Amino acid sequence: MKVIQVDAERSYSVFIDTNWKDSLQDLFEGRERVAVFFSESMKMSIPQFECGDTEFFYFPVPDSEGAKSAKVLMQVWDWLGAAGFTRTDLIIGIGGGAVTDFSGFAAASWLRGLDWVAVPTTVAGMVDAAVGGKTGINSDYGKNLIGAFHSPIAVIVDSRWLETLSDRDFAAGLAEVVKTGFISDTKILEIMDGKSLSEIRQSSALTIELVERSIAVKAKVVSGDFKESFDREILNYGHTFGHAVELHSKYALRHGESVSIGLVFIAELLFELGLIDSDLVKMHRRLLENLNLPVSYKDGVWPDLLAHMRMDKKSRGNVLRFVGITGIGKTQRVEAPPESALLKAYERVSK
Ligand SMILES: NC(=O)c1ccc[n+]([C@@H]2O[C@H](COP(=O)([O-])OP(=O)(O)OC[C@H]3O[C@@H](n4cnc5c(N)ncnc54)[C@H](O)[C@@H]3O)[C@@H](O)[C@H]2O)c1
């Protein structure tokens, strides 16, 4: 087992490559009540926990984004109220990023903040959603618009969950790993370069190393800037165009698939601005294509995508802002790039 420490708002450990049930057991000690949230589709994997006099409550929530709604949250508040949850009780969220985002927000909002533990079961959940304390639900006006920063007391990463994950979800999660490589960890890129999705999947040692390296970067970044006032923005490399595509596709694309397209877009833009060379652009494409991830988006209309990018939270007024790199691990903000460069980058990801 490996432990990575996060020091943001509170200090907590991310336990990696551990037996999730054993690790949870230690956290139940002394709790009167524990609420276990999980998606309905995963109920077969949820055991009946036991620990002294602790009472366990099992709250299945709808799968995926279906969980992240005000309606489900209101239902859960009723359950917590009826079960008499107090400040010293505990919430556990077991599932993909959607379930951990939801569970964290339920914990943040009930009695202004209960302890909670994230048990991520997808690659995206392990390397991104469960670490960092951003919790929330969706509104009719957009994704993740309602939420709170509320750190978990622990994150428990057991890679055996990934055995049942679809290739599509596995690859989508790896897009964030590739992103992490470009912004901060060249070793990630060395490990992945030349490897196919199945080669990575088949080696649990490789998978664990990639997950661990990505968590280490995220832990360091969020420890330095918990509420995303500045440095945390680097985690959004590839996300400005990625979010635009995700929104435009009406979420038909997975988040990681959209990020994959966004990574190629930003690489092409940086090349156009003279900030990186063509070899680095090719490296973006090669790594993502090897994972069977999409690297182009043909269904878009440039003005629509541009309008979506202007709504990105990094943009200020009408000024477009991107996270860029000038080399592997060297991040730099890119503000108000010329429209001609944006258009050229768009042309290269839309054919
Ligand atoms: N809080 C953050 O900082 C942060 C960061 C990134 C993403 N997110 C959020 O995370 C969510 C995306 O997370 P995701 O990619 O994990 O998607 P997801 O939670 O929707 O899960 C994807 C699918 O995988 C299934 N699944 C989960 N674990 C499985 C397993 N072990 N075996 C088989 N199937 C399994 C789920 O039931 C679901 O159908 C989005 O809501 C996004 O907004 C949050």
Image (cartoon, rainbow, N blue to C red):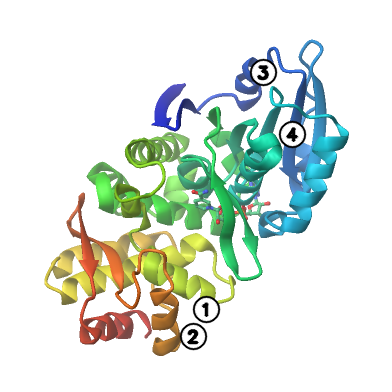
Q: Which residue in the protein does label 1 denote?
A: 248
Give yes or no for contact between labels 3 and 4 (Cβ–Cβ under 8 Å): no
Left or right: 106 in relation to 203: right
* SS of the residue under disc 4: strand
Quadrant of residue 21 in the image? Answer: top right
- Check disc 3 and give the amino acid type: Gln
Q: Which residue in the protein does label 3 denote?
A: 25
Q: How crowded is mark 4: few (under 14 residues within 10 Å), some or many (20 or more)?
A: many
Dot 4 or dot 1: first in sequence order is: 4
* SS of the residue under disc 2: loop
Q: Which residue in the protein does label 4 denote?
A: 36
Q: Residues within 10 Å of mark 3 (few under 14, many from 20)?
A: few
Dot 3 or dot 4: first in sequence order is: 3
- Check disc 1 and give the amino acid type: His
Q: Distance between the residues labelled 4 and 1?
A: 34 Å
Q: Distance between the residues labelled 4 and 2?
A: 40 Å
Give yes or no for contact between labels 2 and 1 (Cβ–Cβ under 8 Å): yes
User: Comparing marks 3 and 4, which lies closer to the viewer?
Assistant: 4
- Check disc 2 and give the amino acid type: Asp
* SS of the residue under disc 3: helix
Give yes or no for contact between labels 4 and 2 (Cβ–Cβ under 8 Å): no
Q: Which residue in the protein does label 2 denote?
A: 299
Q: Residues within 10 Å of mark 2 (few under 14, many from 20)?
A: few
Q: Position of residue 294 (x, y in %)?
A: 44, 70
